[in-house]
Image (tube, grey):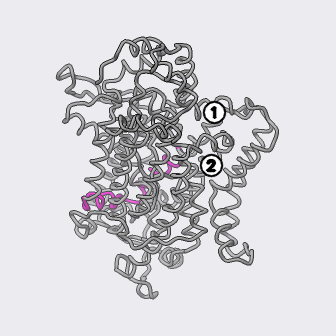
Amino acid sequence: MRRKNVNEANVADNVSEDDADIRNGMLYSVEDTPPWYLCILLGFQHYLTAVGALISVPILLSSHFCMDRDKVGLSELIGTIFFVSGLATLLQTTFGVRLPIVQGGTFSFVAPTIAIMAQWGCPYTEARDKYGESVNFTALGLPEVGSEEHRDIWMERIREIQGAIIVSSVFQVVIGFSGLMGFVLRFIGPLAITPTISLIGLSLFKTGADMASTQWWIAITTIFLITIFSQYLRDVNVPWFTFGRGGCQRRGLPIFILFPVLLAMGISWGICAVLTVTDVLPSNATEWGHVARTDIEEDVLQKSQWFRFPYPGQWGLPTVSAASVFGMLAGVLASMIESVGDYYACARLSGAPPPPTHAVNRGIGIEGIGCILAGAWGSGNGTTSYSENIGAIGVTKVGSVRVVQVGGIVMLLLGCFGKFGALFATIPAPVVGGMFMVTFGMVTAVGLSNLQYVDLNSSRNIFILGLSLFFGLSAPFWVANNPTAIDTGSTVADQIFSVLLSTSMFVGGFIGFVLDNTIPGTPKERGLLDWRKLSTGTAESQNTRMHIYDLPLIQPYLDNISCLKYMPFCPNFMNKGDKYQKKEENGVEMNGDNIKSGIDNTAIVLDDEHELNAHL
């Protein structure tokens, strides 16, 4: 911890009481470094908090990649997304926004991926739909599931997604490092964001329902347990002993609100194991409920490698098509906007000042680089900021960046442990289906929560919201049932329009964006006043702790390069708040009213604290 000088002490006195209260309430704030053993334990806790969302993305996409029941391949995909998420977390916390924020797979990329893969089709899925679960693939001329020929089929599809993610993420890098994010957000309000995010969850209802319907009672048990743990027992703390600055202390651990998904899935998994041993679940593959048995894929742990190091191009050289890139751009834009809100919420809950302009720009740019790395490694998905872990910071009162960095290292190491990914690949389908029913519902609800900023008594807003949601569901349904209806005379154009119109989040978000910016309405009616406070309240809150967002090691050298003040991602970037910083540097005391005003402008992020906890 660095020492405050006299000027800094004067400035600190002017910081709002709310900001001071949050810092005082933290066990470890952003700048603190807990003892090494606590860093390991707390870092592993962050990993456990994120693991439910991390494994859900590859499990969800595996069937669309035509993996069928190649659980060894799925375990390798899970290991890859663990590895890439750890790498992206270390980059973000070290060179990006420099807040304790975990990076991981995102559902924003799921809808475009499914739309792209729909153009490819999957012979294994078609065969199962036609001949049932006991179909003999080799008799139909298809390679055996898990064979090298079958692996070539699904690896070819992942390479297409890799190329789309890499190219479209370049757009995010440019938006971030060029400082264009603030300009883009000027035209995007709640009525464009609500259908975009809500339709991510709504469009996935069939996937969740299909997996849950394989054994509804197991799925309902999983839903019931998640509900009990996350809602009814969220205020119940389990006695626990901790070691901190005051020595050994007895305190309550909010285990139910921290790990409701993991606990529920673990218990349901155990129930499936008991029902398997007692032969309550049918052993005949054609009977309903068979896939809930835990002995179906028990050979996965034997076939998977103990150690497998993911590497770029492990599935082959990525391929690029215009249709896939344009389709993936919708997911990139939605991920960027969601992350901006996460930055402010994370700063508030971790006891840090609101992130300045350069930190937000750098954070978006580094997320783009993280997505490019995810595409190069072949996780089948991109990376984004995890709201679940931000909510965990508010609960545990541990906002140390070092802890999250340790969590990133844990993800890196476990991503190389092949048996670990294989263990998650054996989770019974109805258990995953029950988890999907809850998580997809939460994604939908989080999107709808953005309506808190708009006037819902306005017929204008009701019209925009209703049309964008309904058409966002209708257009993809029509394209799916009329795959040859789009005929522009150009094969490339047909593919682009087919992918875009098959992506519900793009259709709904685009309609909401166009109507919200063309139909007359006051800024207050449209919800732009409060929304812009959330998304653009940047560096106007200058105080003594802004050095948190400086780049490590090289910052003193960057300060001596005057031209860097024109670089939107550098800490000495000139912005509206810099005039106050200039006065402080010249020995002039900063205006306390200006400081308080800046903080109050971003304090609206606190309203989203309940929304973040709802992710858990």
Q: Is residue 204 a member of the stretch shown in magenta?
A: no
Pointer 2 residue: 196
Q: Is residue 229 visible?
A: no
Compared with residue 538, is residue 440 higher up or lower down, i.e. above or below? below
Considering the whole magenta stretch, tell me its main secondary structure: helix
Query: Residue 455: horizontal and vertical position, in percent?
Result: 73, 31
Query: Residue 213: horizontal and vertical position, in percent?
Result: 49, 59
Q: Nearer the viewer, residue 37 or 430?
A: 37
Query: Residue 248: horizontal and vertical position, in percent?
Result: 17, 23
Q: Nearer the viewer, residue 579 or 385?
A: 579
Rendered image: mark on residue 531: 1
Q: Given the current orientation, which residue lies at the most extreme right position? A: 520
Which structural element holds mark 1?
helix
In the image, which residues are magenta?
417-442
Is tag 1's residue or tag 2's residue first in the polypeptide sequence?
2
Q: Is residue 424 a member of the stretch shown in magenta?
A: yes
Query: Residue 13: horizontal and vertical position, in percent?
Result: 43, 11
Give the left or right position of residue 69, taking residue 115 as reference.
left
Compared with residue 241, is residue 555 higher up or lower down, i.e. above or below? below
Crowding around mark 2 (Cα neighbors within 10 Å: few <14, some 14 to 19, many 20+) is many
Give the left or right position of residue 38, taking residue 564 as reference.
left
Where is the C terminus found, in terms of image quarters?
top left
